[in-house]
Structure formats: structure tokens, C-alpha cells
Image (cartoon, rainbow, N blue to C red):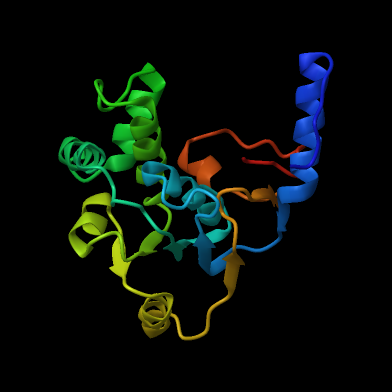
Amino acid sequence: MKEIVSGHFKEAHQFGIDISSKEFSVSIDQDADVSIVSAFPLEDEGPQVLKALGMATIATKKGGTVILVTGVRGGFPEAFLQTFDIAYQMSKGDSKKLVLEYLREGKFIIENAPIDFNAALDYTLLYLNLVNVIIVSKDVSVNEAARLGFRHADSLDQAIKTVHESVPQANVNIFPAGGLTNPVLKKDYSGVLNLLDFPPHGTIEQRRIS
């Protein structure tokens, strides 16, 4: 615990934002070929572990690889995996188009699924249009990883060796607390923003995505 704050809710909230920004922000000056990210402190929380993919994808070159290292207590729920099965069938090979269409219409891809399932689904499908993902977890099977669109490795060493075969000389980011880290982006960053078809804003030197 860093602080206990009272007072007007807007000022107290802003105080919390300022503390979090100071403690958890990391400047991203260059996209890496590979980003290794731990889902800490969201490990063992099922779909929540995928939140760490966001900041890692932001810091990785298009076509690069994110290695997600995490525990998933009890594995991913079957109902969660089924949302990906359905979405991939619906997408007919174009998951980006599927997600953006539903976002623009303000609808969930899987109407009866929980909000966190749909949010994890939307973001993960978009990230996979930018990067390859290897999940390192003894709690997730090769088949379960494939249903999410990931490759699987039993250990970090195995994942690194797999990437090394295609990229023997790589720039690498390492994020030990991907569930907390707030990347501060260079001014010409374009990755996820272009993927979402956002217009450019040349006057803004940095963007924060949390």
C-alpha cells in the first residue's frame, strides 16, 4: 500500500493516477523484436492474465513475438476457450474486421458471455494481428493455447530457443510486471492505434495507454 487518500473523489482519483503513473510508467523508445512479459500480479486469474499482452504488444514490432509467462490456476475456463472457438469461426480468417465491426456497433461478439470474456477476446484478436504470441505455462495445454491463437512452450528457455531459430539477433524487452506496467510511447508510435484505424495526431508527442 502506497497511500490512503480522502477528500473529493475527483481529486482523490487524480492523486491515485499520479502515484500509479510515477510508480508503473516505463518509457518505450524503440519497438523490440521480442518482448518477454510476466502477467504478474494477475497470474492465476484466468482471462485476466491476457491483460499483460496489451502493453507487451505495444512495445513489440509488427510481426514480432510476445512471450507471455504466467500461471493459470485451473487452466482457462472451457467457456472462455469456447468464445475464441466461436469468434474464429465467425471471423472467416479476418479477426480484425470482425472485432472492429462489433466495436463500432457497440455489440459483444459473444452476446451471452461475461464482459471480461468479451473484452479479453476483442483485444487478444487485435493483438494477434500485430504479433505472434507464445504462452509459457504448465497450466495451459498445447491445444488450449492453439484455441486462443497462441503457440505453447513448457519453459521460458524453450520459448526463447523457438524464437531464436527465426530471429538469431533480436532486440528484447523484458517486463517483469506486465499486469501493472503503463507504457509511455514515443511520438511516432503507430501499432495498435493504426490497427484500430484511429486518425493520426501529430501534435501529441506521447500517448499513454493503460
47 vs 116: above or below: below
Q: Is residue 81 left or right of residue 45?
A: left
Q: Residue at x 27, y 50 (%)?
A: 148
Look at the image and tell me whether residue 205 can be seen: no
Hey, which quadrant is residue 77 in on the image?
A: top left
Q: Position of residue 82 (x, y in %)?
A: 19, 39
Q: Position of residue 13 (x, y in %)?
A: 75, 24
Q: Residue at x 33, y 25 (%)?
A: 102
Q: Is residue 191 left or right of residue 1?
A: left
Q: Position of residue 124 (x, y in %)?
A: 38, 45
Compare residues 5 and 110 and report the one nearer the observer.
5
Hey, which quadrant is residue 10 in on the image?
A: top right
Q: Residue at x 37, y 26 (%)?
A: 115
Q: Residue at x 24, y 41 (%)?
A: 84
Q: Position of residue 75 (x, y in %)?
A: 28, 52
Q: Which quarter of the rendered picture does the C terminus lie within?
A: top right
Q: Is residue 72 left or right of residue 3?
A: left
Look at the image and tell me whether residue 40 can be seen: yes
112 vs 29: above or below: above
Compare residues 113 and 7 and report the one nearer the observer.
7
Compare residues 21 and 28 and report the one nearer the observer.
21
Q: Which quarter of the rendered picture does the N terminus lie within?
A: top right
Hey, which quadrant is residue 136 in on the image?
A: bottom left
102 vs 173: above or below: above
40 vs 205: above or below: below
Compare residues 11 and 208 and report the one nearer the observer.
11
